[in-house]
Image (cartoon, coloured by chain):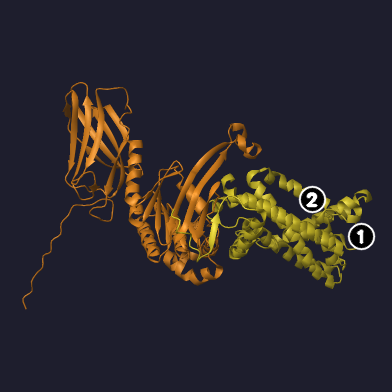
Chain colours: A orange, B yellow
Amino acid sequence: MIDIRAEHVSKRYLLASNSRFANRQLLQPARHRRAFWALRDVSFDVRRGEALGIVGSNGSGKTTLVKLLSRITAPSEGRITLSGRLSALIELGAGFRPDLTGRENIFLNGSILGMTHREIARNISSIVEFSEIYDFINLPVKKYSSGMFLRLAFSIAVHLDADILLFDEILAVGDVAFQARCFERMEKLRRAGKTVVLVSHDLAAVERICDRALLLRSGEAMMIGEPHPVVEHYQALAYSALADFRRPGGPPGQVTCTKLTFTGPTGTSVRTGDPLRCCLSYEAREPLDDVVVTVSLNWPSGYLCTQLSSQEGLRLEPGLGEIEFFCSILTMQRGLYSVDVMIERRGEVLDSRPRCSLLRIDPGKIVAGDFYLEHSCHIRQQTVDR
Amino acid sequence: MSEGSSVASDRPVQVICPLHSAGDVLVSGLRSLVQSAGLLRAMTVTHLKMRYRYSLLGWYWALLQPFTLMVLYTVIFSHLVSYNDIAPPYALFVFAGLTPWAFCSTSISTSAAGMLNHRSLMATVYFPREIVPISFVIASLVDPAIAFVVLLSMMSYYSIPISMTIMLTIPIFAILAILVTSICLFVSSIQVRLRDISVGLPLVLEVLVFTTAIVYPASAVPVALQSLYWLNPFAILVQSFREAAIDARIPQAGDMLYCTVIAVVCFLISYLVFKKIEPTIVDDM
């Protein structure tokens, strides 16, 4: 049984071809306008009870596809057939009116999302309870903290009785507890046999929740299948786009980085709690003293997570060489980290490669929090004489 | 895609594709509109709740607005232009004209602006987009309802008998509502692409108020222009409303038929235009 069928779906946006018409699009005939294809000939099926993950870089057409599936905008070509009621959660709380109270917003937002007045009235106490807003429910939502706002919106969304659910990046907002509840809810929906479409940059979540994944690239469906290979493929693509070692990092200098590899105990898969080996290949053109090499690992958000550093000055001989970093226990959490490499000598940058590689860490020792703390646990019991 | 598997049909199936025929658009559009009655209700209630929230006078504004205009027009026209010779007192005459007119101008101006105010909502959730302008029209019905109460009290003040023909104002208002809805649908869909509408609209409304016999009696229209003047359905409806409400006169069947036909045709055309633009309306917002 197929719940969603997309057949040769394309979406074209017409853009004004010159600035004279930029503000007066209508006045320029369509054939003179520049066409931009946000989606091109995308076909796929989603079976009942299946979860499909949609991955791809920014601008690959994920959001456009979601907008087509949820009927926010119509396809330019092709057709989409849906079986059952579809609810799309694209931006939580988008329909909230700041001046209305929480309770009033529940009624408004619920009906926007397709609930009947009776359904809302029946569920209202449950919605309020789930959102944990309690006494604030009769205050205007403009007085809410962003967390309360989000919880209320999510709570309404959770009470939707749809057959097909579409989630677009809603995991990206909210704190860890909120995300955990989202996951829990999604698992529950899956068990209830709902069809789920999940658009996310959280690739680990896609692998965990989805049965299949669709990779979009520049508006085209590049790959569809088991989530793991699709995600791997996407990461390899992202890696090749990022890991540009040929790009000169400044004037051709005394030393150049040529290659960076990360290896775990069983090959290229790196997991939390396992040892990690990082190898940086370089080519030096003259002997160099006092060299400091740093490999920075950045969170997906771009902030520095941690660094590997050679600390004291190294001496590099002319020719090819390798610098190896070894971590006995990798404490970083699962995720995709971007990597910067920098070779310095006494404050002078010899070679700098920002975002030159990606490090993917798979779930290993799973702990909550920002990092894994190596530990052991013993029990000491006192025996009591009877 | 395998040949054997097909889209499951045990649940309502919807097909999203670029083109429909006019008949399909009308049928499916009206059906989804009926299905979204709950949303229409919620949005209308929201507009009403939002309108005077945090204002000191609150719903008294709904009384104050037509009342102020009535006083203004009475002062200007009865003293400067001197329409004192006509049968009903001028203040009552103006107020009876302003009651349907306030409904027209409020619905048209709020629904045109409302479309753009709901931009972020439309970009994230699908619902039949015509609900936005229609909900503004329904919310605007509250003003004439309040004004009507004022009208009745004014009539008793001037000791004018309230006749049964006052019941006829309801069908007259229904025709007016269809006509206004069609204008709102048209204006709000065009407005998304041509923002000129929001600038030019107050001007157009101003022109309409003076080409409709609201502040002056229809008899003041030059004889040469009379036939042209009565082509305007607004003029007919406002005049009929006033006659039914305060003059105890039954409107002519021919006039009502003419207005109904115009209103329904306008509604169908503007609904189709709206539905034609609707699928990609978000792209232009």
- The front one of B23 and A94 is B23
Mark 1: which secondary structure? loop
Whichever of callouts 1 and 2 sits on the residue coming sooner in the sequence is: 1
Q: Is residue A42 left or right of residue A116?
A: left
Question: Which residue corresponds to mark 2?
Answer: B208
Q: Amino acid at mark 1?
A: Ile
Labels in figure, total: 2
Residue found farthest to the top: A286
Above/below status of B189 relative to A352: below
> Residue sitting at 32 percent across and 32 percent down?
A244
> Residue sitting at 81 percent across and 56 percent down?
B233
Q: Quadrant of residue A262?
A: top left
Name the mark on residue B86: 1
Q: Position of residue A16 (x, y in %)?
A: 59, 36
- The front one of B219 and B191 is B191
Q: Is residue A186 left or right of residue B120?
A: left
Q: Quadrant of residue B73?
A: bottom right
